[in-house]
Image (spheres, helix red, strand yellow):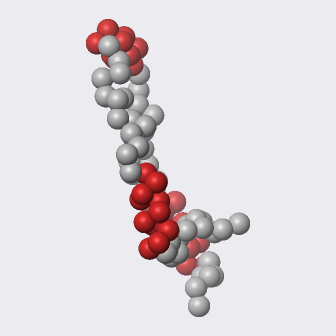
Amino acid sequence: MFGTNGFWVNKHLPDETKQKISNTLKGNIPWNKYEKGCYSDDTIQKMRESHKGKTPWNKGLKGSISDETRKKMSESAKNRKSHKK
């Protein structure tokens, strides 16, 4: 509907609106201000133990595309028509 980059790309708010937003947000406490230290040491230890021995989801993904696949992707991209004129 709005493209891949989003609605607000290359659009700017007027300075008056920015000032109104700024004034509205002054004095508010951020949602994550007190989040630090929210887990006890015992809970952290339990979480650490539960993750031991598990393989990370992204292990081995770096460079997983073969040269042949890269070449196919490159050719496909070259054949696409650009939306820019």
* Residue at the extreme bottom of the image, as rendered: 85
| Percent coordinates x, y for residue 8 in the rendering | 55, 68
Query: On screen, 11 above or below 49?
Result: below
Query: On screen, 22 above or below 61?
Result: below
- Asked if residue 4 shows in the view, the reply is yes
Return the residue nearer the eye: 68 or 17. 17
- Asked if residue 52 shows in the view, the reply is no
* Residue at the extreme right of the image, as rendered: 1
> Residue drawn 38% across and 16% down?
47
Which image quarter: residue 50? top left
Tag count: 0
| Percent coordinates x, y for residue 64 in the rendering | 44, 49
Which image quarter: residue 53? top left
Looking at the image, residue 7 sits to the left or right of residue 25; the answer is right
> Residue drawn 41% across and 31% down?
56
> Residue drawn 59% across and 72% down?
76
Looking at the image, residue 25 sits to the left or right of residue 6; the answer is left
Quarter that holds the N terminus: bottom right
Return the residue nearer the eye: 32 or 60. 32
Looking at the image, residue 71 sits to the left or right of residue 85; the answer is left
Quarter that holds the C terminus: bottom right
Query: On screen, 31 above or below 74?
Result: above
> Residue drawn 34% across and 29% down?
34
